[in-house]
Structures are given as C-alpha cells and as structure tokens.
Image (tube, rainbow, N blue to C red):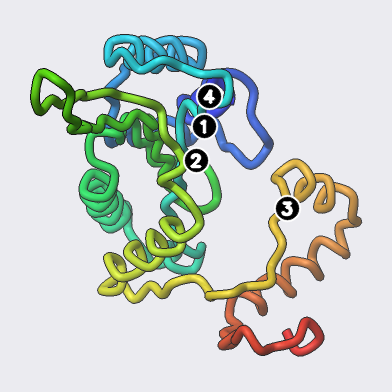
Amino acid sequence: KVTAAANHNLRHGNFNHNVDLTRSKKNVVLLDKLLAKNGVEFRQKLEKRYDDLNAKIRSNNVLAMEFLLTASPKFFEQMTEPDVRQWLEAQKEFAKTEFGENLLFMVAHLDERTPHIHCVLSTDQTTTKKYKNRYGECEKTTTTLNARRFGRNYLKDLQTRFADFNSHYGLKRGVFHSKAKHSTLKDFYKMVNGVSADEKEELAKVLEKLRQLEVELTPSMTGKQI
C-alpha cells in the first residue's frame, strides 16, 4: 500500500482517467525528505529510515500515514495560479507545524479537477522512560512505530485546526456527526461510468445543488430528517 500510494503521488505507473497527465508538470513537490523516484524506492527508503532509528518493524505496524489537504472545487474556481501557489505554501507551513519531523513528503496535485495536497508521514515515535534499579535512577530512550496516536479524536481535532487555519480564506469545517458513508474511488467511478450521458448530465446538476446546500446537522436528527 505504501508503494501504491507513493506511485500515485509521484505519478509513476498507470492512473485513473481523472488524472490529466498533460498537466502533471504543474504538480508541485512542496517537501521531499526521501527523494525517491518511484513507489518501490520510497518504501525502501522509508524502511531504511526506521532501520537507522533502530525502530523494529513488526508485522502489524502501520508504516506510514497519508493525509489529504484540500477544499471544495468552488473555492478554487476564481483563483489565479499565483493565488493557488500561495495557498499551497500556506498549507505547507500548517503541515510542518502539525506533523513535525514525521512529515516526509508533500506534493500538490494540480492535474486533477480540484487542487489538493498529499502528505505522507512516518509513524516513528521516540520516547524516554525513567526507572530505578539497584544502580540508581536510569533512563532508556527507544523508537517504535506508533500510528495509534492518529486516532479518532486526533483526526476530529485535526480537521478543526485545519479549518481554523484556513478560516481567513473563507473556508469552513466539514459537518460534525455527518451520516455520509465513504465510497472508494473504484466504486465511485464504476457508478459514474455505468450511467448514460443524460443521466450523467442530471447527476452533475444534482451534485452542483448539493455543493451549494448548507444544512446544520445535529446528533438528534433522524436518518429520515437528514
């Protein structure tokens, strides 16, 4: 999965039809600590990082985390290229502050419909524990792979911090307690490609109306009300 994600981010190999490879030269690498050319090399260099840190990779370890920084398509419609680049640089500062030394790679994809940034993080965490034995007080520093700290509450708070950081752009946070269910890209494209031209046109109209719709959802709402 690390290899596949890196290949996508580096535009190496085959891609979905939503990627316009003629515009891929406009993509911007905002940060790159591993300097890998493809997914295999990225995974190898990531594993070497852990080896250099003496962090043993266990079979159930999460090797990397990936975060997507983006906004609605409407937000970018009126922006010039310099405006987009300024927004991208601002997001880079947010990510560096938020993720620190674990932030390994950031790329802005401008060859898809909506500009967005992929951030790839290592999961290594170094801790120092103090203890006592017959020789006195001692301490031990170890580095392990720990993705559990990126849990549910962290992710909810991260979205809030991201929205606060971008509030001066006029952006708002996603809805709390949304009942929306995630669909994979594969399922989404299967659905879109399986309808007629007329149905696609009608679907586009519905999606545009949904983008303009703002409803305050509350935990007490029933599924029917939503």
Asked if residue 134 lies left or right of residue 114, the reply is left
Asked which secondary structure carries label 2, the reply is: loop
Residue at image position (55%, 51%) is 113
Residue at image position (51%, 30%) is 62
Residue 55, image x, y percentages: 35, 17
Disc 4 vs disc 3: Cβ atoms closer than 8 Å?
Answer: no
Q: Which mark is residue 183?
A: 3
Residue type at mark 4 is Val
Nearer-N-terminus badge (1/4): 4
Look at mark 1 in the image and give the residue it sits on: 22
Asked which secondary structure carries label 4, the reply is: helix
Residue 43, image x, y percentages: 46, 16
Look at mark 4 in the image and give the residue it sits on: 2
* Residue at far left of view: 136
- Which of 113 and 80 lies nearest the eye of the viewer? 113
Question: How many residues crowd around disc 1 within 10 Å: few (fewer than 14), some, or many (20 or more)?
Answer: few
Residue type at mark 1 is Thr
